[in-house]
Image (tube, rainbow, N blue to C red):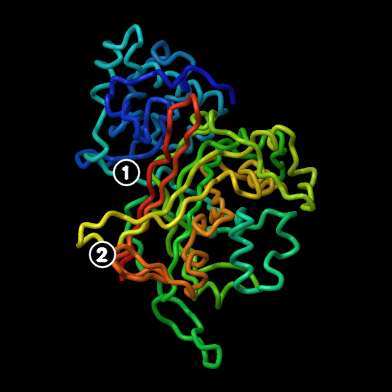
Amino acid sequence: MPLDFTHDATRQSWVVTANAPDTDFPLQNLPFGRFAEPSHPALRIGVAIGDHVLDVTRLAATLTAEDAGEAYAGFQACATGDLAALCALPPAQVVVVRRWLSNALWDAAPDAAANRARLAPFLHPQAAVTLHRPLDFKNYTDFYASVFHATNVGAMFRPDNPLLPNYKYVPIGYHGRASSVVVSGTPVRRPFGQTRPNSEAPPVFGPSRLLDYELEVGIVVGQGNALGEPIPMGVADEHIFGLCLLNDWSARDIQAWEYQPLGPFLSKSFATSVSPWIVTRAALAPFRCPAYARPAGDPSPLDYLLDETDQRQGGFDVTLEVELTTARMRAEGLPPVRLSQSQLADLYWTPAQLLAHHASNGCNLQPGDLLGSGTVSGPTKDARGCLLELTWRGAEPLTLPSGETRRFLEDGDEVILRGFCVREGFRRIGLGECRGQITA
Ligand code: CA
């Protein structure tokens, strides 16, 4: 994915909030999402620019083939209002839509005044619209790609043998529930389920008492593959449309009782939150990095997961954070407290390896499918991406600025995930935020 003028850090937008140093959505980002206005409830595709959203669906309907040039096919896909139509196009077609938008929103373009007059009717403050989940995901698969997370969780259950022998050979995952993927801001109701708090007594049915979050990144699939035809490792990266934030809410007590022998089920399927914006692979091009450097003695990936380019630049240099507020903290005017910070580049497998593995048996991935990275934890204690790890299964409670303690989430707690990319010589871009508040 080559760099081009859309990554030029000196470019500014006539949407002035896009030029704020700390915005997640400068001209260099241009992430895609879906929104509706109170007066027009039909969902449209939008692009975030500063604190505004550009209605690309309605803009596209006004563009002639001459206006749009080589971006015409991409804008026609946006005119449908279904982001999966854009995901389904060859990546080069997405890039030319990005270039068209970058030029049209650029304050120093030769025709900036005309561009502004043309686009202004399609700009809305984000605060004045409702952001929806970016896609109606047909399929959702969650992986387990952080070796630090897998080792920590394994150590709680199997202190002598934390990492199972398959881990360093096969990307571990399970099929999640697509219908319960919700957009940031949607309340998450504490699930009921079957648990066995006392191993000497029969199981009970009731509200989960060990509710947790998981800090993850969602990988949105671009072009799919035909049933029976795997995606070769050498082109797997080109099948990534973009990345978003993902919170894989997890009921640990339900999980502990149900997970053997087939893996998580109702402990996960009650809700998964995603951020409203998908940052495209093109926007992330300046922030690529090598695949995780495996320690000496670890096996090399099998051939079908090994590609020289992927090893050299298959990682994404994204910093991820978790913040928490409680009802009492909000009542006392206390700001959210940061619980952890970790790096997407610390994943044991690259997103392209996860995608190639998923399709390696001939399973057909479809445009707009959602793959979760798995909890992104790092080597240090402050880089643990869930409460299960941070409090070591509740044995080491956290103390919050309000004086409250937490082992797991309480009703009224709000979890906020954030992600951003910083690299010398490039404009900082962000993934926005992914919020969810627990209700009784
Ligand atoms: Ca997970």
Q: Quadrant of the N terminus?
A: top right
**Labels 1 and 2: the sequence-earlier one:** 1
Q: Position of residue 194 (x, y in %)?
A: 48, 79
Q: Position of residue 413 (x, y in %)?
A: 32, 64
Picture layout, residue 71 above or below residue 124: above
| Residue 72 shows up from this direction | no
Give the Cα separation between the discs numbered 1 and 2. Answer: 24 Å
Which residue does the numbered mark 2 point to in the structure image?
Answer: 327
Q: Is residue 406 left or right of residue 15?
A: right
Q: Nearer the viewer, residue 404 or 205?
A: 404
Picture layout, residue 282 above or below residue 295: above
Count the numbered circles shown. Answer: 2
Q: Position of residue 214 (x, y in %)?
A: 48, 59
Q: Give the amino acid at mark 2.
A: Ala
Which numbered dot is residue 246? none
Some atom of ligand 1 lies within 8 Å of the CB belonging to the residue at label 2? no
| Residue depicted at x 52% and y 90% | 202
Q: Dot 2 lies on which element?
A: helix
Q: Nearer the viewer, residue 116 or 384?
A: 384
Picture layout, residue 165 above or below residue 24: below
Q: Is residue 237 left or right of residue 249?
A: right
| Residue depicted at x 48% and y 61% | 386
Q: Dot 1 lies on which element?
A: strand
Which numbered dot is residue 131? 1
Q: Position of residue 7 (x, y in %)?
A: 47, 22
| Residue 325 shows up from this direction | yes
| Residue depicted at x 52% and y 65% | 389
Some atom of ligand 1 lies within 8 Å of the CB belonging to the residue at label 1? no
Q: Give the amino acid at mark 1.
A: Leu
Q: Which image quadrant is residue 101 in?
A: top left
Which residue in the rendered view is the most extreme toward the top? 110
| Residue depicted at x 34% and y 34% | 23
